[in-house]
Image (spheres, helix red, strand yellow):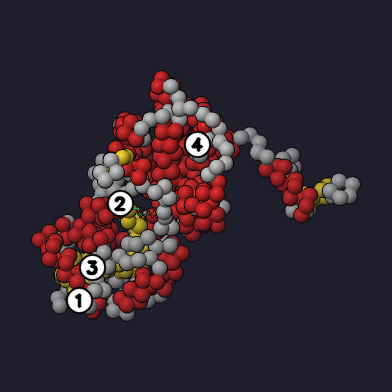
Amino acid sequence: MTATAQIGVTGLAVMGSNLARNFARHGHTVAVHNRTSAKTKALVDQHGHEGDFVPAETAEEFVAALQKPRRIVIMVKAGDPTDAVIDEFAQLLDEGDMIIDGGNAHFLDTRRREKALRAKGIHFVGTGISGGEEGALNGPSIMPGGSVESYKALGPLLESIAAKAKDGTPCCTHVGPDAAGHFVKMVHNGIEYADMQLIAEAYDLLRAVAGYEPDRIAETFRTWNTGRLDSYLIEITAEVLAHTDESAGRPFVDVVADEAEQKGTGRWTVQTALDLGVPVSGIAEAVFARSVSGHTDLRRAARELPGPKSEPLAPAEARAFAAQVEEALYASKVVSYAQGWNMIGKASEEYGWNIDLGAMAAIWRGGCIIRAAFLDRIRAAFAADPALPTLLADRGFAEEVGRAQDAWRSVVATAVRHGVPTPGFSAALAYYDALRAQRLPAALTQGQRDFFGAHTYRRTDREGSYHTLWSGDRSELRTD
Ligand code: 6PG
């Protein structure tokens, strides 16, 4: 077989074959391979006319079809299947070749794999790809990690198939070394969870408190989508809410079981945030909310617990309330993104990735699930101050959230009064209030820790670390 392909894709389930088609449609010759060759054949039979595909039956044929340095994109299940495919191909590759893992791998696996392959002279490029099946075909947001050298050979190909932001720039950039790409994809998904939870809470409030029906709520979301909340997730929310289930003749949202599932990237984000010591309460509440929804046993046991007696609002009040919900949703969203960006910043420091925080917002403006007009504001905030400690400190965001805070508080209070759970809105507001507090009750926590465990504390008025002799004369000792 002559080496004619610029890139190869192995693992031809929907994401893999759509990505291969996207490369082919952009004029690249693409070698395609799958464990079972029926999928390879089906891809070429159905879509061969879209571009230049080189079908390969065996791993050896596949590798032989690739120009050097070889670029192999693997699109297989995260975990053991990924390791198996890497092992299979690594032995067929030469120094300087690249294996690009486009799945949702855990970043620690990516670090391990990158290190092992680097020792063999092979570049391992853990790459986040967002946008689902449609994005893979028509332009995803792409987050490659790995070496700078690999990006030189790979970047132009990836950029050619990536979504383009409104200003025309590709939604793809070199995120940073080793696992930086998979790490930011994980946080992207965490933010996606938080965004979805906040939207769900807004829906719940409009339904239970404002008394709106799903089609009216769809209309409300459509209107919001023309303003600062303009985003893919708000757009599809309106579509889902406006959909009527044909067989039941009822709103689709009323016939779907109310138990949200998850594949795990949101959970990974929270687990990792705990290890890094970064508070991502908005993402955590979103993960827990999905988990609560799935605990049908607990919900069944608690169904008869008393709640407040409350009636939906009168129409004029409902309209005003809906406007307040928009403010609460926006402010809570800013908090979630602020937390997500803090997490990326902390990991970047911890692992020495040197991630350009503004560039992450830039490549999420198009293609990915959280794409939104709003991301250009985040890009601009970091462009104005690359050392911005939190998005909430950006003047523009601070002013907007400050203006929204009365409505935000009122929505959370109303939710509590009506017994509607809003963990996302409430946690975001608590985080906002915690950051702006002049004094936090953490001083008392320190006192308690010192009392029962002699864990020591620092003082506001002098340097050093101290312990009070709580069971003695309560005199204070300097301990450092
Ligand atoms: C994307 C999505 C994608 C996916 C996740 C979410 O960026 O294209 O985030 O990765 O849909 O797997 O899945 P769960 O909600 O099942 O965790």
Of labels 3 and 1, the one closer to you: 1
Badge 4 is on which residue? 420
| Earlier-in-chain disc, 3 versus 1 | 3
Can you give x and y, in whole percent of width and height, for residue 286 in the image?
47, 47
Can you give x and y, in whole percent of width and height, for residue 352 in the image?
48, 58
**Residue depicted at x 25% and y 52%:** 134
Viewer-proximal residue among 174 and 268: 268
- With 44 as the anchor, is 360 left or right in this view? right
Badge 1 is on which residue? 57
Amino acid found under the numbered disc labelled 1: Glu
Mark-to-mark CA distance, 4 and 1:
56 Å
Mark-to-mark CA distance, 3 and 2:
20 Å
Amino acid found under the numbered disc labelled 4: Val
As drawn, the label of residue 8 is 3
| Earlier-in-chain disc, 3 versus 4 | 3
- Kindly state the secondary structure of the residue where label 2 is placed: loop
Amino acid found under the numbered disc labelled 3: Gly
